[in-house]
Image (cartoon, rainbow, N blue to C red):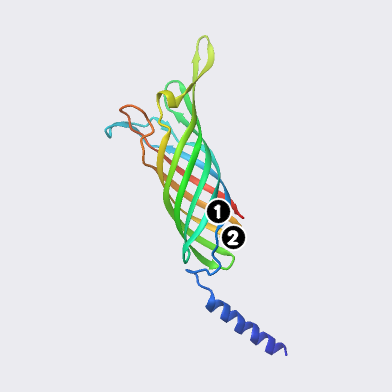
């Protein structure tokens, strides 16, 4: 009897393995998710007409929190729009210590494809545009003088920076047990972030954790 049960178990396991498709999961469905990311903001060199380049900005840390909606399109191809809110810091290399702390929102519009390596593990590749709008950008000028140390706070969007940006994001992610999510991605800035004759773009590197509902 034990041999018969063992034989049936092996046969059923083989049937399930044959029915399982890495590229076309029949159980694909739409879902919402939350995402939390650590961000490294890495601005490019400041330049005028791509000449006289200056290493003006420091790469600095930030956070990104938001929601996504994952929609299957065809087989394991999916579309994933979202809404996220970010907080980034940027250091400026000058004689006086200047830092910029920005807060805003982004709308990622990502296309991806997931590969169902195991029933409980999916690996995905994704790419797409990401629209960004800055709400505030407080520029802190930390000044040291003979009279003492003090700070001057101004709105960088009024004088130096542009609020709007479009980035192109690309990355790889993994989903565990249909619920838990982790990803590594980058986003290349496409629009100049500095007003006037200058040019500088803001690139991002993200490490993301999430949960799917």
How far from the left and from the top, in percent, is residue 177? Answer: 61, 62
* Residue 176, disc: 2
Q: Nearer the viewer, residue 188 or 145?
A: 188
Q: In the displayed structure, does residue 196 sit left or right of residue 20?
A: left
Give 32 or 101, whichever is nearer the viewer: 32
- Percent position (x, y) of residue 49? 26, 33
Based on the displayed image, in which of its 4 quarters is residue 48 positioned?
Answer: top left
Residue at point 51% right, 58% down?
71
C-beta proximity under 8 Å, tags 2 and 1: yes
Q: Residues within 10 Å of mark 1 (few under 14, many from 20)?
A: some
* Sequence-first disc among 2 and 1: 2
* Distance between the alpha carbons at the discs numbered 2 and 1: 9 Å
Q: Is residue 108 above or below residue 119?
A: above
Q: Tell which residue pokes out farthest to the right in this image.
A: 1
Q: Residue at x 44, y 45 (%)?
A: 130
Where residue 108 sits: x, y (%)? 47, 47
The residue furthest top is: 147
Q: Quadrant of the N terminus?
A: bottom right
Side (left or right) of 14 relative to 4: left
Q: Residue at x 42, y 21 (%)?
A: 95
Q: Quadrant of residue 46?
A: top left
Q: Considering only vertical position in the picture, is 85 above or below 82?
A: above
Q: Secondary structure at mark 1?
A: strand
What percent of the width, then of the height, locates residue 75? 47, 67
Where's the C terminus, which quadrant?
A: bottom right
Total numbered circles:
2
- Secondary structure of the residue carrying tag 2 is strand
Residue linked to disc 1: 182
Q: Which mark is residue 48?
A: none
Taking the spot 56% from the left edge, 67% from the top edge, the residue there is 27
> Mark 2 Cα within 10 Å, few/some/many (few <14, many 20+)?
some
């Amino acid at each position: 009897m034990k041999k018969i049960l063992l034989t049936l178990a092996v046969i059923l396991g083989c049937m399930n393995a044959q029915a399982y498709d890495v590229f076309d999961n029949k159980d694909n469905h739409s879902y919402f998710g939350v995402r939390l990311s650590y961000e490294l903001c890495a601005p490019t060199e400041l330049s005028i007409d791509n000449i006289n380049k200056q290493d003006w900005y420091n790469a600095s840390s930030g956070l990104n929190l938001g929601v996504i909606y994952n929609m299957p399109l065809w087989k394991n191809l999916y579309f994933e729009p979202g809404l996220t809110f970010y907080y980034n810091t940027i250091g400026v290399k000058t004689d006086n210590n200047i830092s910029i702390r920005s807060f805003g929102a982004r709308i990622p519009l990502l296309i991806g494809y997931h590969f169902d390596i195991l029933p409980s593990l999916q690996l995905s590749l994704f790419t797409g545009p990401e629209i960004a709008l800055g709400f505030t950008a407080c520029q802190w000028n930390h000044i040291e003088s003979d009279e003492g140390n003090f700070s001057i706070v101004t709105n960088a969007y009024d004088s130096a920076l542009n609020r709007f940006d479009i980035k192109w994001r690309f990355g790889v992610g993994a989903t565990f047990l249909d619920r838990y999510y982790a990803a590594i991605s980058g986003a290349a800035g496409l629009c100049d972030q500095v007003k006037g004759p200058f040019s500088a773009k803001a690139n991002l590197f993200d490490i993301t954790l999430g949960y799917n509902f």
